[in-house]
Image (cartoon, grey):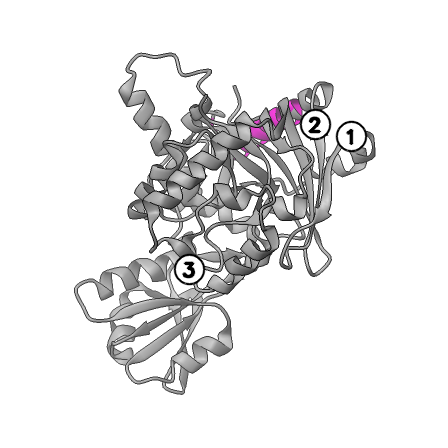
Amino acid sequence: MHPFQSTSILLPEGADMEKWAVIACDQFTSQPEYWEAAMEKVGNAPSALSMIFPEVWLDGDRAARISAIQKAMADALEQGLFKAYDRAYVYVERTLKNGSVRQGVVGAIDLETYDYRPDAASQIRATEKTVVERIPPRMAIRSGARLELSHVLLLCSDEEKQLIEPLATMKDSLPKLYDFDLMLGGGHITGWLLAGADAEAFDHAVASYEQRMADAQGCGRDKALLYAVGDGNHSLATAKECYEAQKKAAPGANTASWPARFAMVELGNVYSDALQFEPIHRIIKGVSPDALLEALQPLCAENGTAIQWVAGGRHGTVSLDCNGKLPVAVLQDFLDQYLAGTAGEIDYIHGEAALEQLANADNAIGFLLPGMKKEELFPGIVKGGVLPRKTFSMGHAEEKRYYLEARCIQA
């Protein structure tokens, strides 16, 4: 059994798909007006919005909202809203606002092959450190839910573009499942069905990719890093913890056919031209810039990686001795240790101009981090484990995955 595989996929029949699909729950967390606009657009129409918990509303009545989510899922199943596509994938083309097209394949991962812990040696690993405190609220939703709707983006490392990209050449011969504009500036999305012989052919392509990855890493496929979670780390960690809890409650059970053992994701290629990594800079407040730079000196080397800093109108660089690790990982580890037990605070900033402005304040220093190269992602995880939080951003909020396909996770 492969880590990434086909699954039974549910899609609503007869629904207005623009009202059905909604953006990932962890977007626009400081902009309730976005979600209010989504609610107004949806009205009383069938929508994934009734089956997710936007994090902007986490401070409200959680129990009532979770109960409403679980009821909406049960009602949709009992009323026959969905059509099922068994042992299938969905090939997706997402046209972004800038006109670029991001390709993906919706399927499922075997959670036995995934581990989000920093020292994981599993075939599927997190890209960033998981904040375990964020898991229990999500478990409260998933544990009693009959369906999952996923915003997880899983990444493969296919520089030769042999796995996903060839599907574009055969899409005209595939059944088209949906083709519509995503609400509130999300661009356009089209999906085609891969089932039967087409799904089996993709299975073979997946197996070939996984073997190439194992060969490149010089180890068996069971020890190789095959996939990395690009977005939705905490949602996938929640699925893992729910599955582990069920296993613990049924020791010795054969879990091979348990729906909860699997989690739906969209697989994309880290080398896609439409997938851009944007740097996330650091601002540290409440510290002496000079004292912090002095403490950073033992981690520097003459031929290290140059990182720019700015503080109170002053600019300079430090040369970090990274020893194969990503510069952001070396810097973040230092900052975490340096700030522990102090009144200093760190924040994560998009954009150089915003960082420059914030670093003009007293007792503040900012670090301008370079954009991470795509070829650094998988080797960085293999060598250094999961990356620090806020290592990179995969596009703007409107470019995140929308909830669209569904899957049963319990009867």
Relative vertical location of residue 101 with respect to residue 371 in this rendering, above or below: above
**Cα distance between the residues tagged 2 and 1:** 7 Å
Counting residues from the start of the chain, the first of labels 2 and 1 encountered is: 1
Reply yes or no: does residue 44 show up in magenta: no
Counting residues from the start of the chain, the first of labels 3 and 1 encountered is: 1
Q: Which residue, given by chain and number where applicable, does mark 1 sit on?
A: 174
Q: Quadrant of residue 389?
A: bottom left
Horizontal and vertical percent position of residue 75: 51, 31
Give me the residue at 52% from left, 43% from top: 151
Furthest residue in direction bottom, as rendered? 313
- Return the mark for residue 348: none
Horizontal and vertical percent position of residue 161: 68, 40
Give me the residue at 66% from left, 39% from top: 15
Reply yes or no: does residue 217 show up in magenta: yes
Relative vertical location of residue 170 with respect to residue 200 in this rendering, above or below: below
Q: Please give left or right for residue 76 compared with residue 356 in the image.
A: right
Give me the residue at 58% from left, 38% from top: 267
Q: Nearer the viewer, residue 187 or 51?
A: 51
Residue 192 in view in this figure: yes
The amino acid pointed to by label 3 is: Pro
Horizontal and vertical percent position of residue 246: 33, 23
Q: Which residue, given by chain and number where applicable, does mark 3 sit on?
A: 327
Residue 121 in view in this figure: no
**Cα distance between the residues tagged 3 and 2:** 40 Å
Query: Callout 1: few (<14), some (14-19), or many (20+) C-alpha neighbours within 10 Å?
Result: some
| Image mark count | 3
The amino acid pointed to by label 1 is: Leu
Q: Nearer the viewer, residue 81 or 248?
A: 81
Q: Over which residues does the magenta segment extend?
A: 203-219
Q: Quadrant of residue 56?
A: bottom left
Q: Which residue, given by chain and number where applicable, does mark 2 sit on?
A: 194
Contact between marks 3 and 2 (CB within 8 A): the answer is no
